[in-house]
Amino acid sequence: MSYSDLEVLRRAALIHDIGKLGVEDPWEELASVDGKMTDYQFYNLKQSSLLGAMIARETPAFGEGEDPIAYHHDWFDGSHVSRNQSGQEIPLRARIIAVANSYDRLCMANGEATLTYDPMAVEQLRTIPTA
């Protein structure tokens, strides 16, 4: 990635969840349904991504971050996506934000809400199916 690509990624990552301000938090009740997201919760998750992308598009400093924000919840295997795409078709910056977001969520689940290395979270990331 070029320096300018990394800068777009950095700015998009800063606000990637800003759309959650406009929808019900889909993660809040996730534990109550055996860790599986309901269709309604998934709908809210996708709506938050699209709302965040609209906010980015209308904000000059974040405009180029629209796609990474819109698609950072799209699954690599092609299920649960905003548009018909999978794997390498999902924008690279969206995939990077998705991995960082997953790592952060796993660290919190392991009781590590810090910026330190969490080997349990890394191992869990390695076991997530990618295709």
Image (cartoon, grey):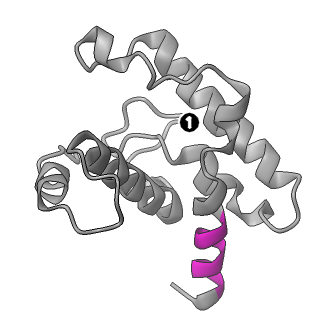
Q: Position of residue 94 (x, y in %)?
A: 51, 56
Q: Which residue is mark 1?
A: 83
Q: Is residue 106 left or right of residue 104?
A: left
Residue 42 sits inside the magenta stretch: no
What's the residue at 12%, 54% (across, down)?
Answer: 120
Q: Main secondary structure of the magenta part?
A: helix
Which residue is depicted at the point 59% across and 71% down? Answer: 10
Which residue shows up at 51% across the image and 48% down it? 72
Q: Quadrant of the C terminus?
A: top left
In the image as oriented, which residue stretches furthest toward the bottom?
Answer: 3
Where 110 falls versus 120 (above or below)?
above
Question: Residue 43: x, y in percent?
Answer: 55, 19
How far across and how far down the image is residue 71, in percent?
55, 46
- Residue at x 47%, y 58% (from the top left corner): 97
Q: On the rendered structure, is 89 left or right of 13?
A: left
Q: Tally the marks.
A: 1
Q: Quadrant of residue 103?
A: bottom left
Q: In this picture, is 105 found above or below 20?
A: below
Which of 11/106 is in front?
A: 106
Report x, y in % for residue 33: 29, 10
Say what secondary structure mark 1 lies in: loop
Image: magenta residue range: 4-11
